[in-house]
């Protein structure tokens, strides 16, 4: 075989390169060990909750509201907590998604005045780093105001401030930075010549954003919404302080839907918190079953995000 037809040797992996120093090899080994440890911890949590949840979960728990009883066989299920999770998730995203898209479009496509845009960016970052308990306390201060008394239970002029409205409004702040970041990243990934082509055929900036940019960034919008939903359904502090964490729905007034939304209730996170072995309810079997359902919801959301990313990659990428 001639030298021209011989296959050239491939590149030597860095870990096998003799030029690597000892400290580099040690650092690479530590990175590998930490990565494996992290995966093992995550797998242990998921497997443990799956095993414990499947052991205690039954279909009746999903459709039976909590009841008063002396043991776990008499205390019903957690249907109210499950419905409460769906309610706050829907209401929170109904607030966070349009506002987040609007902020992302303004920051990415307009950003004027520049000083106000920088303040807006800093505010989004600050909200993203604020503990949810701080947001809960801030929400308590707002929704106990007499001006917002129509959104929750009141008694002799005292506004309690606990309702699905208040909890959803503050939970939307938890999801807002994720929506803004994801949508903004999707818009910035669209090359400039796409915008210039739209302007060249007479489209205005608003029409370009509405008809071209936002449809092209739809995978990023879906990703931000899924990530925001995951944060909303996993929060506990805001639920406990602003929803009341009562195991059953306690509506206000006689209006069917509005009465429930103005009243108190619970979600899966507050139900788990209450029934954990160290909680006031001390019903670990019910807590493990609810934790399994919550974990399943989070895994479904993460899988949905992965599917959206894969489909977006298969659809093609922008090229210059």
Image (spheres, rainbow, N blue to C red):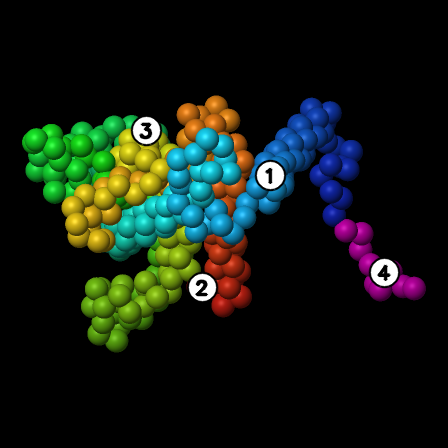
Distance of mark 3 from mark 4, alpha carbons?
Answer: 66 Å
* SS state under label 1: helix
Distance of mark 3 from mark 1, alpha carbons?
Answer: 29 Å
First of labels 2, 3 by sequence position? 3
Give me the disc on residue 93. none
Q: Position of residue 207 (x, y in %)?
A: 23, 68
Residue 128 in view here? no
Q: Residue at x 71, y 39 (%)?
A: 14
Report the residue marked by disc 3.
133
Q: From the viewer's perspective, is 123 left or right of 189?
A: left
First of labels 3, 4 by sequence position? 4
Report the residue marked by disc 2.
318
Quadrant containing the N terminus in the rendered view: bottom right
Front position among marks 2 and 1: 1
Distance of mark 2 from mark 1, alpha carbons?
Answer: 46 Å
First of labels 2, 4 by sequence position? 4
Q: Which residues are magenta?
A: 1-10
**How packed is label 4: few (under 14 Cα within 10 Å), some, or many (20 or more)?**
few
Q: From the viewer's perspective, is 245 left or right of 219?
A: left
Q: Position of residue 202 (x, y in %)?
A: 22, 74
* SS state under label 2: loop
Distance of mark 1 from mark 4, alpha carbons?
Answer: 58 Å
Asked whether disc 1 touches disc 4, contact meaning CB atoms under 8 Å apart, the reply is no
**How packed is label 2: few (under 14 Cα within 10 Å), some, or many (20 or more)?**
few
Asked whether disc 3 touches disc 1, contact meaning CB atoms under 8 Å apart, the reply is no
Distance of mark 2 from mark 3, alpha carbons?
Answer: 41 Å
Q: Position of residue 218 (x, y in %)?
A: 38, 62
């Amino acid at each position: 075989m001639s030298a021209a037809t011989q296959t050239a040797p491939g590149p030597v992996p860095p870990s096998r390169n003799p030029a690597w120093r000892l400290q580099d090899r040690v650092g690479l080994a530590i990175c590998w060990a930490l990565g494996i440890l992290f995966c093992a911890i995550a797998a242990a949590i998921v497997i443990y909750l799956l095993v414990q949840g499947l052991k205690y979960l039954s279909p009746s728990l999903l459709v039976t509201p909590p009841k008063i009883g002396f043991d776990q066989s008499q205390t019903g299920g957690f249907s109210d907590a499950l419905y409460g999770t769906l309610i706050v998730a829907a209401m929170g995203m109904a607030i966070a998604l349009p506002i987040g898209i609007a902020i992302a479009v303004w920051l990415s496509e307009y950003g004027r005045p520049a000083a106000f845009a920088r303040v807006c960016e800093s505010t989004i970052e600050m909200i993203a780093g604020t503990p949810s308990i701080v947001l809960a306390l801030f929400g308590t201060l707002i929704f106990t105001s007499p001006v917002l008394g129509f959104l929750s239970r009141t008694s002799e002029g005292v506004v309690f401030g606990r309702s699905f409205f208040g909890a959803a409004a503050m939970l939307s702040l938890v999801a807002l930075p994720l929506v803004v970041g994801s949508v903004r990243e999707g818009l910035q990934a669209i090359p400039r010549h796409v915008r210039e082509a739209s302007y060249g055929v007479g489209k205005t900036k608003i029409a370009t954003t509405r008809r071209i940019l936002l449809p092209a960034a739809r995978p990023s919008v879906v990703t931000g919404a899924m990530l925001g939903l995951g944060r909303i359904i996993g929060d506990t502090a805001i639920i406990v302080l602003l929803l009341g964490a009562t195991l059953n729905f306690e509506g206000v007034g006689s209006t069917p839907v509005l009465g429930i939304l103005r009243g108190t209730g619970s979600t899966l996170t507050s139900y788990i918190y209450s029934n954990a072995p160290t909680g006031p309810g001390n019903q670990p079997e019910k807590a493990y079953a609810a934790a399994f359902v919550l974990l399943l919801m989070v895994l479904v959301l993460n899988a949905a995000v992965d599917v959206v990313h894969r489909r977006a990659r298969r659809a093609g990428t922008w090229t210059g």
